[in-house]
Amino acid sequence: MRLGIYEKALADDLTWSARFSAAAELGFDFLEMSLDATPDKLARLAWGKAERRAIAEASREAGVLIHAMVLSAHRAFPIGSADRVLAAHGQTIMTDAITLASDLGIRIVQVAGYFSLPGEQVEGSRERFLVALERSVAHASELGVMLAIENVDGRDVTSVADAMALTEHLRSPWLSVYADVGNSAANGHGLDDLKSAEGNLAGVHLKDSRPGEFRQVRFDEGVVNFPGVFKTLEEMKYRGPLVIEMWSDNRPEWRRDVEEAKRWIVETAAKRNQIPRATNA
């Protein structure tokens, strides 16, 4: 298994070359790019050809690919929204993100499972989400980019099984599931939820959580049954990427935190004979 690290686990002020170097030094095979709804992240969609080439070249030189993009901007711009302007903006973000992924050699774009904004009218939101997603899958398939639906917090895609149901509805080889075991556990789901994506799992986010607490829970201090997760992946014959998802929040000790998290994950996985082997370790 290949082991990656989420971009937000590293210091915010690093250049792309420094990010790739840090990931390599820490023993990771790949990096996950963030594309959230903040202006600096959305500005990445406007990168020119020269900038895109430079980032792709820096990635190759470091030997650390950007394997996936975490497209969480749809938390603020949901494509299933009843607000047509908001939904159209979300669709544009999706289209541009897929194109950016293709230009940078990113294999997977994660689609956050938010149908509409919190408190917004929900009637018909799932159906609107599916219509928009079908258009996005068509664009992604033309460029050879995989879309993968991630289970999230909130009220919409709260389980891996929910994400799997959406992929079964559209039935495209370019649409799969990206399981977040932390979100699943925080929403009250057990290991059977992970197993529901058997045969259609593009990646797995590893993070700990507590009921209603979806981020910044240290590994082994939450409710996620990590030995069970690795055992379940073994039973599923899963050989895809694993990603440690964590946030530095500009803490000066971010590197130490990442090292400790990686050590804990590797040791825990080894107990089930499922060691994520990073080629740069």
Image: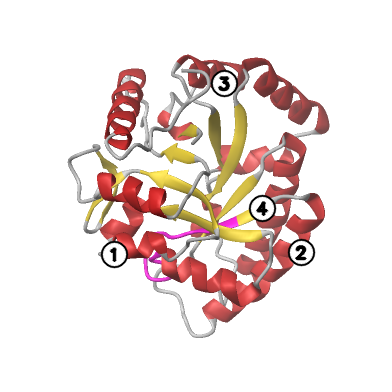
Determine the image quadrant of residue 102: top right
The amino acid type, in three-letter code, at marker 4 is Met
Q: Is residue 248 above or below residue 182?
A: above
Q: In the image, which residues are magenta?
A: 148-159
Percent coordinates x, y for residue 10 in the rendering: 44, 26
N-terminal of the two: label 3 or label 2? 3
Taking the spot 36% from the left edge, 30% from the top edge, the residue there is 248
Percent coordinates x, y for residue 257 in the rendering: 30, 24
N-terminal of the two: label 4 or label 3? 3
Label 3 – label 1 distance at C-alpha: 34 Å
Question: Magenta region's main secondary structure?
Answer: loop
Element at badge 4? strand
Give the farthest residue toward the bottom: 123
- Asked if marks 1 and 4 touch (Cβ < 8 Å), the reply is no
Judging depth in this view, the residue of 67 and 234 nearest the camera is: 234
- Asked if marks 2 and 1 touch (Cβ < 8 Å), the reply is no
Percent coordinates x, y for residue 205 in the rendering: 42, 46
The residue at which mark 1 appears reads as 189
